Amino acid sequence: MSDTQFDRKPNDKAKTGAPLLPCYDDLSASCAYGWSMLKRGVKDRKCAFHTPSIATISATGSPTIRTVVLRGCATEDKILRFHTDTRSGKIAELNDNPFAAMHFYDAGAKIQLRLAVRLEMLSGDAFDAAWEATRPMSRECYQVMQSPGSIIENPQHVQFDASASQDGKAHFVPVAAHVLQMEWLYLAARGHRRALFDFENDTQNWLVP
Ligand SMILES: Cc1cc2nc3c(=O)[nH]c(=O)nc-3n(C[C@H](O)[C@H](O)[C@H](O)COP(=O)(O)O)c2cc1C
């Protein structure tokens, strides 16, 4: 059991835990704080928001989930970005159904974000900018010649070919996640705070935690 009991009843006398954030009882400020955590997640490799989970729907209708590295956050446009391999399962799934869910939890801050997103593979200038920004170590992942997830008899049979894969560029794709909704959950000893920000309908509401 974690030290943050989710089912704890609101208790004004509680004095334990981190000091309350100024956005505690402020809807708009909670939303802004969520976006600031996403922005920081791109730059700060040590923070929990750097590696969210993203869930898509498989051809059989069941959800699939995996970790990705958060590569971009355009707050004004409400777009996040991650990078992947064109041959990966998640790309096949987003081609069938571009709607996905992203999950972030920072245990230190005690803040969870659940995002409803629409995924879009980027091309043109956005592709070029993302590729140019990748480091040599990241490029290596995309130089693998067999499709990610394919069965091999021996792990040593994985083959990399920089020239055949154009340094990995042939298999690389940046993916934009257009954020449709953000659900905020802030665990606090004096009472949790939960809110839903709907960017499509431009609404924001507190929810029962
Ligand atoms: C810390 C961490 C970071 C990862 N980052 C990425 C990433 O940015 N892009 C990616 O495609 N896979 C990333 N992966 C691997 C995925 O979680 C997953 O195993 C892989 O992409 C295959 O997923 P799929 O078959 O569902 O497409 C990461 C895994 C971990 C543990």
Image: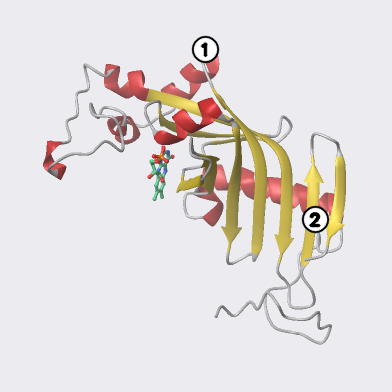
**What is the image's colouring?**
secondary structure
Mark 2 Cα shell of 10 Å, populated few (<14), some (14-19), many (≥20)? many
Where is residue 110 drawn, in percent x and y?
64, 66
Q: Name the disc covering residue 195, or none.
A: 2
- The residue under the point 53% across, 44% down is 54
Which element carries disc 1, helix, strand or loop? helix
- The residue under the point 70% across, 50% down is 34
Looking at the image, residue 133 sits to the left or right of residue 119; the answer is: left
Task: Tell which of 125 and 102 is nearer to you.
Answer: 102
- The residue under the point 48% across, 47% down is 65
Inspect this view and state whether residue 44 appears. no
Residue of label 1: 124
Looking at the image, residue 205 sits to the left or right of residue 92; the answer is: right
> For the residues marked 2 and 1, what is the alpha-carbon distance in whole angstroms?
36 Å
Of the image marks 2 and 1, the number of the one nearer the N terminus: 1
Task: Tell which of 5 and 25 is nearer to you.
Answer: 5
Q: Name the disc covering residue 132, or none.
A: none
Inspect this view and state whether residue 197 appears. yes
